[in-house]
Amino acid sequence: MSVVLHDYWRSSASYRVRIALGLKGIGYDRVSVDLVKGEQRGAQNLSVNPQGLVPTLQIDGMRLTQSLAIIEYLEETRPEPALLPATHEGRAHVRALALAIACEIHPVSNLKVLSRVEALAGAEARGQWNRENIAAGLEAVENLLDHPGFNGRFCHGSTPGMADCTLIPQLYNATRWGVDHSHLSRICAIARNCAELPAFQAAAPEALA
């Protein structure tokens, strides 16, 4: 049974899942859902994702939504290579990092929110809103990385995991919006190490555009 990912090339949430699939070595087909054109609200996408969002992953005869839930499912059903540490403390830390991005930075910067900000206050306010949100969020993540589980390579330990799948797409957005993060030494170290891995390279928006 084929694996199908319904996604958009610039969607942070989709980008996370693409990285995770790559790290797990899971091949898949893509169905593009153009968020700019509003295809997420069309009947075709709503038939697979009633929220009108991306990503949706068709796998094992199911349709899974919400990026972190998808990654957790992949981890539970295909545990190698692991995307979560072996210890309870380590797993809690990785989940906290991932949620700090997926639940705190990303929702306030998604297309629906930014479009509403622009409608209320103009394009300049949209940009300022997004840059301030991303910058503050990444500062917090940098501080969360000051943790015994961080050894200078990835978000936790010596192999990439769920938190790295979440961080790298957010850094793509930061660069796209002109948010400087060069002073965040832990985050920059992670970005350099992830950039060397094929799973991150293949999942990048530039590889799909």
Image: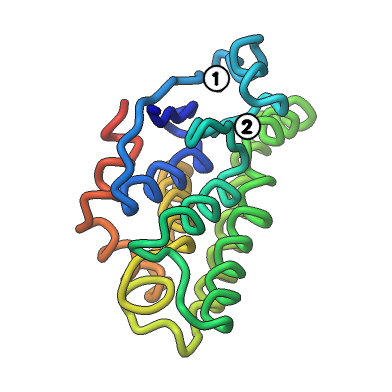
Residue 209 in percent (x, y) is at: 31, 26
For the residue carrying disc 2, how many other residues have a C-alpha within 10 Å: few (<14), some (14-19), or many (20+)? some
Q: In this view, does 181 lie above or below 61?
A: below
The answer to whether residue 136 is left or right of residue 113 is: left
Q: Which residue is drawn at 71% across and 24% down?
A: 50
Residue, x 67% and y 57% (percent of image)?
A: 104
Image quarter for residue 17? top left
Q: Residues within 10 Å of mark 1 (few under 14, many from 20)?
A: few
Q: Is residue 129 visible in this depiction of the protein?
A: no
What's under tag 2, amino acid-wise? Leu
Q: Are marks 1 and 2 in contact (CB under 8 Å)?
A: yes
Q: Is residue 181 above or below residue 157?
A: above
Q: Which residue is drawn at 62% across and 42% down?
A: 66
Between residue 52 and residue 152, name the one nearer to us: 52
Residue 139 visible in the shown view: yes
Residue drawn where x is 56% and y is 45% of the image: 67
To which residue does mark 2 refer? Answer: 111
